[in-house]
Amino acid sequence: MSKIYDEDNVFAKILRAEIPYEKVLENKYALAFNDINPQAPIHVLVIPKNPYTDLYNFIQNANLEEVKCFWELVNDVISKKGIEDMGFRIITNSGKDGNQDVPHFHAHVLGGKNLGRMIN
Ligand code: 5GP
């Protein structure tokens, strides 16, 4: 994954409100919205509002408040969806081997059913 941020990626367009999306929650530094092609009954994407290409780039460059806000929003999505006891899976794909499609850092929050083994 190139570390040069692509301003035309779909999540950048969502952040600029150029394309529609179903918002779940947001805070000062992060936005959560439903995945357009859900892989589970609950499939929410959490993204930072600032431009980072992947998790590695985010942790290297974001300040502590941004990192805290990001993971707090993941927790708030888990609470809002009521899956803290049933369980869930957080996935963040990165780069070529991670099969990352959208080059803006995001965490998938998946739940609402038994998700099976981690890697097929
Ligand atoms: P990745 O493969 O990069 O980890 O995941 C990208 C995710 O973004 C996929 O699950 C895909 O369904 C989702 N996605 C792609 N385009 C859009 C879009 O325009 N809107 C929303 N809400 N999700 C999208």
Image (cartoon, rainbow, N blue to C red):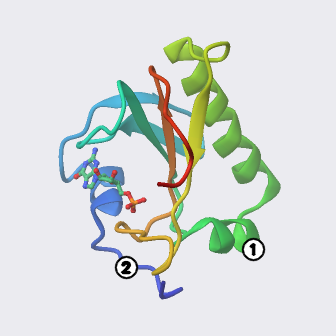
Residue at screen point 24% across, 42% down = 36
Residue at screen point 36% across, 52% down = 15
Q: Secondary structure at mark 2?
A: loop
Q: Quadrant of residue 24?
A: top left
Q: Amino acid at mark 2?
A: Asp
- Residue 3: percent from the left, percent from the top? 53, 86
Residue where numbered disc 2 is placed: 6
Q: Amino acid at mark 1?
A: Gln
Label 1: how many residues lie within 10 Å, few (<14), some (14-19) or many (20+)? few
Tell whether label 1 touches label 2 (CB within 8 Å): no
Above or below, 80 against 22 in this view is: above
- Residue 73: percent from the left, percent from the top? 61, 34
Residue at screen point 59% across, 23% down = 78
Does 100 sit left or right of 77 as displayed? left
Comparing 63 with 24, the one in front is 24
Q: Secondary structure at mark 1?
A: helix
Above or below, 42 against 19 in this view is: above
Residue where numbered disc 1 is placed: 60
Does 7 sit left or right of 49 as displayed? left
Whether ligand 1 has any atom under 8 Å from the Cβ at mark 1 is answered as: no
